[in-house]
Amino acid sequence: MSREDELTKIEQHLQELVTRIRADRLISRRGEGSTAAWLETAAAIGAEVADIRAAVVLANADHGLKSGKSAILAYLRMHVGEPVHAHRLEGVSGIGEWARRVRELRVEDGWPIDSKLSDPRLPDDHYRLNANEPDIKLAEAWKLAKEVRNTKESGRARLLRYLKAVSPAVVDKERLSYVSKIQEWPRRMRELEEEGWKIVSNVDDPSLAPGSYYLKDLTRRPPRVRQAIKQRHAILERDGKRCRDCGNAPDKDGVVLQVHHILPVHLGGKNDDDNLVTLCHNCHAGRHSASEFDVRDELLHPEHEPGLLE
């Protein structure tokens, strides 16, 4: 039997399997049939699926695809920039451990493959290859991440060590979670920022995906600014990380949140929480009747507050 005939036979088998499952569901809905009979059918289907997978592996080899990983890569390269459902990758690989092979392509070989974990904008159970060539720097970054992960430090110390090593490169939440080995890593990132490290998130830079961060440089802010950072986080949390005027949040393109004094400092306003409000940069500029480029976060940059410059 030729390979084409085998593939045609596989396709017919798949259609038959779907037909059998649908027929059994109809019988079950009518209250007929037995669980035992269905389990025997399901077991038979499982055996046929295993045969189909084995046939896919052989067919891949005939096409010069020596492994499930090479088949996955070839398929993703056919669809660069497109979200591809996990079921398709499982299908082209012909193996059960296809997800591990995707991870190897990204982590060990440097292929820039996104999942929903690294890009929340992707649909569930989808992957996307972003370029047709591997990213050597990405592979090196993952190698470093593995080295830092294996150090005997706290999760927070590992995060800082890694951010310093790759600064000012952006790190997505998948790598940060991997490096820290703790579920509370976002809280540790906030603590590092409150300690004066210049950590940037999508609250400050809307071009970043949610959960991505970078360390701007290796210098720490002075103690006064560290206290302001802690208070700024509290105000942003209180206001739901949304502009209190227009309701926009950092997940919208171009939105940067800033803290504004309701009663300006030069008119006697204080840094009390009830005199502070979260605004987007556009609404902030509107409050001051100034260009959006002339206003900054007034807790982090008190010397730049409109009114004090006049």
Image (cartoon, rainbow, N blue to C red):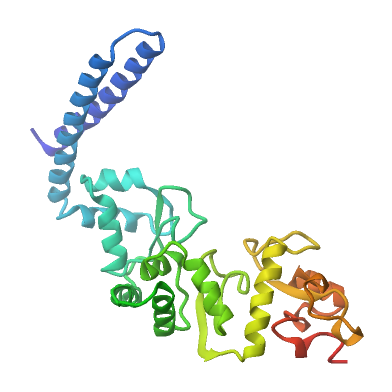
Residue for point 67% across, 64% down: 237
Which residue is pictured at 35% across the width and 65% down the height?
132
Where residue 100 appears, as percent x and y from the top left, is: 26, 55
Q: Position of residue 165 (x, y in %)?
A: 39, 84
Image quarter of the N terminus: top left
**Looking at the image, residue 18 lies above or below residue 200:** above
List x then y, in percent, for residue 81.
43, 59
Left or right of 103? Residue 187 is right
Instruction: Report whether residue 260 is seen.
Output: yes
- Quarter occupied by the C terminus: bottom right
Question: Within the image, what quadrant is residue 199 found in?
Answer: bottom right
210 with respect to 88 (left or right): right
Seen at 12% across and 44% down, the residue is: 58
- In the rendered image, the residue lying farthest to the left is 1
| Number of residue marks | 0
- Left or right: residue 35 compared with residue 285: left
Where residue 191 sits, quadrant-wise, is bottom right
Furthest toward the right, the residue is: 267
Q: Is residue 73 visible?
A: no
Q: Residue at x 65, y 82 (%)?
A: 227
Q: Position of residue 226 (x, y in %)?
A: 62, 84
